[in-house]
Image (cartoon, grey):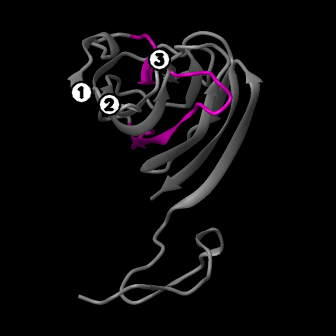
Amino acid sequence: MSLIKLKNNALDNLTSFEGSASLGDMVFISSATASASSSIEFTLGDYKEYKFFFVNMHPATIRAKFQFNLSTDGGSNYNVTKTTTFFNSEHNESGSSADLTYRTAEDLAQSTSNQNLVRDMGNADDESSSGTLILFNPSSTTYVKHFISTSNTYFYSGYTMNNFVAGYANTTSALTNIKFQMSSGNIDDGKILMFGLN
């Protein structure tokens, strides 16, 4: 097994690896920064995989849920049928409570509703959520479209909460767009970065 040594001093300027690994085909496509935004939308293309990084998403409304939905018609409608799963681990600041729970209220069963990625966020000035969403082969016209998300949030009552979401968009139509929003109120602050992988 060969060792990998980064050739640059900072990851944001990384251009090559030394060793048997390569940077592969991960391509930065776009980013958007929220500022009291009702939603953030991205157009999808022909990449085999899309990876979204959402960083310090801060809701205007306490207990808002950060969520997404998908479109097959260029963003005119965000109502793709989804079946999903959602569980989370949590631990409070005082160390007196910890939990690992499947959240039936957060999953979907053949529903066109928005899928929650994060639940019940705090909206104090220092509270936010960060994580990733991976969407597989959205341009396929043969298969359903799988997705996986992991994130961590500052839960509104002083907990760290690690969220795990997965599922599929139950359509063989190509997905054209994705939209992120809060379940109530605006996205007060935060940044979403979109990468494509072949």
Sequence-wise, the earlier of marks 1 and 2 is 2
**Residue 125 within the segment the image draws in magenta:** yes
- The residue range painted magenta reads 112-140
- Dots 1, 2 in contact, CB < 8 A: yes
The location of residue 129, given as percent across then percent down, is: 53, 34
Residue that label 1 marks: 99
The location of residue 101, given as percent across then percent down, is: 22, 23
75 or 120, nearer to the observer: 120
Sequence-wise, the earlier of marks 1 and 3 is 1
Binning the other alpha carbons within 10 Å of mark 2 as few (below 14), some (14 to 19) or many (20 upward) gives some
**Residue 98 within the segment the image draws in magenta:** no
Quadrant (top left, top right, bottom left, bottom right) of the C terminus: bottom left
120 or 68, nearer to the observer: 120
Element under disc 1: strand
Q: Is residue 165 visible?
A: no
Q: Quadrant of residue 10?
A: bottom right
Q: CA distance from mark 1 to mark 2?
A: 5 Å
Q: Quadrant of residue 102?
A: top left
Q: Which mark is residue 120?
A: 3
Q: Is residue 22 visible?
A: yes
The location of residue 37, given as percent across then percent down, is: 73, 23
- Residue drawn where x is 33% and y is 32% of the image: 91
Binning the other alpha carbons within 10 Å of mark 1 as few (below 14), some (14 to 19) or many (20 upward) gives few
Residue that label 2 marks: 90
The location of residue 192, given as percent across then percent down, is: 62, 41
Residue type marked 2: Glu
Q: Is residue 53 above or below residue 75?
A: below
Binning the other alpha carbons within 10 Å of mark 3 as few (below 14), some (14 to 19) or many (20 upward) gives many
Q: CA distance from mark 1 to mark 3?
A: 16 Å
